[in-house]
Image (cartoon, rainbow, N blue to C red):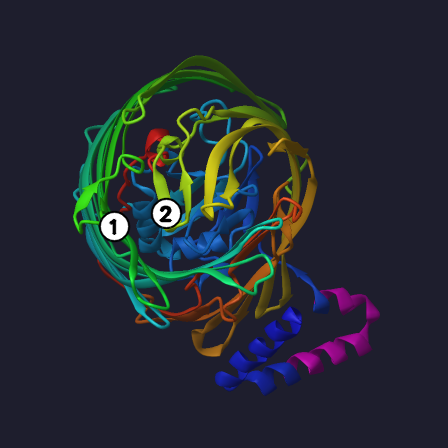
Amino acid sequence: MIIKLWFLLFLLFLSIFGKAQEIVKSKVSDSLTQVKSSTTTISEVILQSAPRKMKLNDGSLVVSVAGNRDFKTSTHLLDVLRKTPGVTVDQEDGIFIGGRIAPAVLIDGKPVVMSNQELQAYLRSLSPDMVESVEVNTNPSSKYDAEFKGIIDIKLKKNISLGWKASYNGNVYINKFNYKENVFNTSYHTGKVTYSLQAGYNEGISTYRYHALQRLANTNIMRTHTYQEDFGKVYNIQAGADFRMNDKNRLGINVRGSFRDNDRTRDGFLFTTDKNETQTVLNTVSENPTRYSQDNYGITTDYSFQNKGFKINFLGNYLSVKNKQNDDFINRDKTTANPLSYWKSDLINKINIYTAQIDASQKIDHADLEAGIKYSSSDTQNNIRYDTLSAGNQFVFDPVRSNVFSYKEKIWAGYLAYRQKIGNLQINAGLRFENTNSISNAVTVDSVVAKNYLKWLPSLSANYTFNKSSEFSLSYSRKITRPVFSQLNPFRFYFSPLNYWIGNPYLLPSFTSQIKATYRYKNWITSFTVGKEKDVMTRYPLYNPETNVLEYLGTNLPYRNFAVLETSFPVRITKWWNITSQITGYYNDEFRPYLDEVFALKIYNYEVRLNQVFSLPKGFTVNIFANYESKTGNSLYIIKPRYTVDVSVQKSWFDNQLNTKLGFNNLLDSYEQRLEFRHKQIMDNRFTHWWDSSRLVFSLSYTIGSSKYQVKENQKTEEENRTR
């Protein structure tokens, strides 16, 4: 059915530009002529090898971006990543690789210094023509932070022209509400110094819906429905200078600020009946207006020195984040409109992060020796106060919900790496240590948890090149995943008045060991990853039938085994029709104790993605992207299948200075997330998350100026990733 839809959409676009009949007749005629002349030329008509757009780098997939027809209709780099093999971008623009691994994002080999929201805005500010390539590394070596279980390295185009350059990028997303993105970039290059300035402003409304059913066996049935509108404004500004003092020394400095304001309205109802659904137990409506703001300030300094085969780099970062949020929770009886409960919350969250690292490398004949040391210090302070409306119509302090929580973490890390090339074989070996010292203090409940541990994390890889057409890579690594601050914070984060999740300050870090094998034959790349994760961090539901409260609590599972088999290949059907296909299979086996039982199911699922590009007359490019995800889940929950179809068209004007794109994302509004509890004898729990990802998109970019110099972007540390 989906294939038929792609074909119909393809014909529709051809007819729009008035060339459908001519092209179809021409191709059919050419094919018949060649078939009659010689049966040996059939393969040349049906399938042709596409130009090489993918390659391997030590087992990592490298995809060219600038000039790649597969990405011409992409509005920005985030859209490029959505179509990149091995990368998944969800409804909230979260980026994942290798299944559900949140990767670190690097710019020219260095992590960027931005929060998740800022990173998404930055990726939207990069047009495909500004990016040389994207490298997807699902098994990083010990050279990288142990938290990096996956890496996306974005290589910007290298330019050398002097002078100034300015560009504007604007995107408008249209459905029930509009959302607008605006980014202005300018830079001036003197030859030795490059000055840069970037300013952005985003504004608009996004919507979200949540539906849930909660029922224990032989108890009441509760249905939850929530609708949310979020009006947000985001201001970003950053300025930097890059000093190239001479051929050996370079110094860079960058300062930035980001300011976000959101006004959210969330309305819903809770409808509870007895187990036979004949008698109403509870029927309430709720209002949850929220006012949220975030202020970020950051500074980055970096220095590098290189002489012959020796190179040393220093990188220093400071990040300050301040979050403020005020909520009102108002519950009324739906039938009588009488108030049932009313409470307010006042949250202040402050995070300060300092990092410093030094890396040195020495080239010795055909070998490279690298070493580095890093120190990071993170301090987060959370204070949330709840006040409840009393019978006397006065708000009084609520000690049950309120909490004060602080978390401090210091990490010393170092690594030693060796690289040797012997003929067609390249060997990489590394060893990393990380010493973590942390203290979490839940002041309100008088609970202090201190941890101090040292871990050694090795890596090893070998890459053999048979010839220009084929190569093979095998790698091993051990990684650590520390819980993010929100997972440790023992506050209640509400989905509805009776549905929330709570952080757990006793969570342990998890450790993952995995082996990955990758083989490339021309444009066909296949990889297989197998591994084991211990102390897996996850959440589990706990339903109270007396209060109808459903909590999601954090815990560590003993282990999970996993495997990923992935293959991707581009095919040129005709001169004007290219297809890039990706097929991925997943295996997951986790050991999950829950309510005095143990569940250990083996879960198999797969994902299929097809990216079709049609090059039409008069410079128009049409793209149809489709993605299908089969049924999946874990030992407790089933995640239902879902699919999406995106359609877009692109055209450049005025010698490529002006670029316009028009598209429709999630054309069939079919990408909602539906989950269902597996074990009905314990609990019937089903819920659906829906985001307004079905949108008409218009994008415009315009570039002026003579300079082609690409400014180096900020850098981001592992600790800053974990502030999300």
Where is residue 474? Give x, y as percent. 64, 29
Can residue 542 be seen?
yes
514 or 233, nearer to the observer: 233
Give x and y (percent) for residue 499: 43, 48
Q: Nearer the viewer, residue 584 or 712?
A: 584
Callout 1: helix, strand or loop? Answer: strand
Give the side of residue 674 with respect to residue 177, left or right.
right
Amino acid type of the residue that numbered disc 2 sits on in the rendered structure = Tyr
For the magenta stretch, what is the residue range?
A: 26-44
Q: Which residue is mark 2?
A: 494
Q: How far separated are the C-alphas under marks 2 and 1?
A: 10 Å
Name the quadrant of the N terminus.
bottom right
On the image, the x and y values in percent for residue 324 come to 21, 43
In the picture, the quarter occupied by the C terminus is: top left
- Residue at screen point 66% across, 32% down: 598
Disc 1 marks which amino acid?
Asp
* Crowding at mark 2 (Cα within 10 Å: few <14, some 14-19, many 20+): some
Q: Quadrant of residue 300?
A: top left
Report whether 664 appears left or right of 536. Answer: left
- Quarter-wise, where is residue 35 in the image? bottom right
User: Taking the image as drawn, is residue 304 in sight?
Assistant: no
Q: Give the answer, above or below, for where 528 lies relative to 394.
A: above
- The question of residue 39 being in magenta is answered with yes
Which quadrant of the view contains residue 180?
Answer: bottom left
Please give the residue where the numbered disc 1 appears in the rendered image: 327
Residues under numbered marks 2 and 1 in contact, where contact means CB atoms less than 8 Å apart = yes
